Amino acid sequence: MAAVAGAVRVVLIALQLAGRCGATSASLPVVINTWAFRKATETAWRTLQLGGSELDAVEKGCGQCEIDQCDGSVGYGGSPDESGETTLDAMIMDGNTMEVGAVADLRHVKNAIGVARKVIEHTKHTLLVGESASLFAVRMGFPYEDLTTQKSLSVYSEWLNQSCQPNYWKNVVPDSSKSCGPYKRLEKSSCEEGTISQRNIRNHDTIGMVVIGKSGIVASGTSTNGGVHKIPGRVGDSPIAGAGSYADSTAGGAAATGDGDTMMRFLPSYQAVEYMRMGTDPTVACQKVISRIRKYVPKFFGAVICANTTGSYGAACNKIPGFTQFHFMVHSPSLSQPAEQVVDCI
């Protein structure tokens, strides 16, 4: 009897330790997404509950933000480029097959992540861009629509009236801090220090989402209309696998938001997933990738969310003036409804 009691005690201790690490089946499924985009979380969760796949949940969740024009930074009618046009970037990734579908500089089609899904389903490619991506979307049955609204036109008009400030040009003539151009390259380049933190705060509120199903299958995705007043043709981190998001059903998923021109150089989502593969806690994994970027660009604006295949999750952000906390959404079996979570930036 003593031996049996001892064995039972060992099992109970093991179960308690597993619970502390979040490694219980009750932790799954989980939906986590950047920013306080509650309806996106609700839509993704509902899709899972109705029997949809993890990829379905990501597509529907991010697609909800495209419909709602979340923060004016996702979907149509926001972030006009310097010609006044709204263009979209999106990606979706299947962590089981490692397939990725992505579109960038998408014009005249509102459901960018839906088009990205079709890239997986109907092509052998990974990324389609520009007007050609729009033509592909139309062939896939998506309506060809105007992405401009009165609000985006107003933003564009106000920017023109302020001598096109701020913008993304450097080392050009005429002086981009005083003129709208057109610009030509400056023969003798100088090292200009841009006002990165001021320009990008609340200017790149991409929705990034990670969904992990009951069996540990991982999917991720992003959708955004990019940086306001960007140079036409610019592509940020959102549609780039490993930068905007990354999913691997053997480890977990991650997604990034912020200054994509900086963050995409470091593949933060891929790096975070690799840290989790090595057993690193999701919060620590997020912190490590933020710290790595900060070594090179101390004042960058950005945040990362992470979740592993046990259902544990976390987030981290870079602390700069005006951005000291990061808000994100989570839904799991332990929550009766989507919960907004806040993390202090490091």
Image: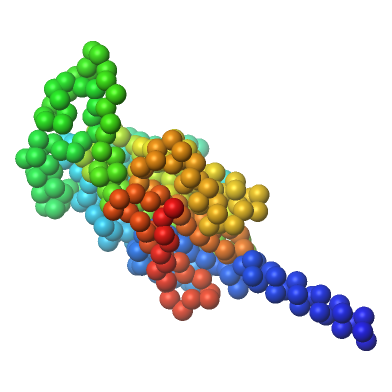
Q: Quadrant of residue 228?
A: top left
* Quarter of the image that includes the N terminus: bottom right
At which x and y percent is residue 88?
30, 45
Q: Is residue 237 visible?
A: yes
Residue 182 located left or right of residue 295 = left
Relative depth, front residue between 109 and 271: 271
Q: How is the image coloured?
A: rainbow
Residue sticking out furthest to the left? 161
Relative depth, front residue between 113 and 205: 205
Residue 1 located left or right of residue 31 = right
At which x and y percent is residue 247?
54, 50
Residue sticking out furthest to the bottom? 1
Q: Is residue 218 visible?
A: no
Q: Quadrant of residue 233?
A: top left
How many discs mark residues in the rendered view? 0
Q: Quadrant of residue 170?
A: top left
Please tell me which residue is depicted at 22% across the width and 46% down the height of the picture. 79
Please tell me which residue is depicted at 10% across the width and 49% down the height of the picture. 154
At which x and y percent is residue 274?
60, 46
Relative depth, front residue between 12 and 248: 12
Please tell me which residue is depicted at 35% across the width and 46% down the height of the picture. 301
Up-down relation of residue 112 to residue 41 (above or below): above
Up-down relation of residue 341 to residue 223 (above or below): below
Residue 14 located left or right of residue 303 = right
At which x and y percent is residue 205?
32, 52
Please tell me which residue is depicted at 42% across the width and 71% down the height of the picture. 339
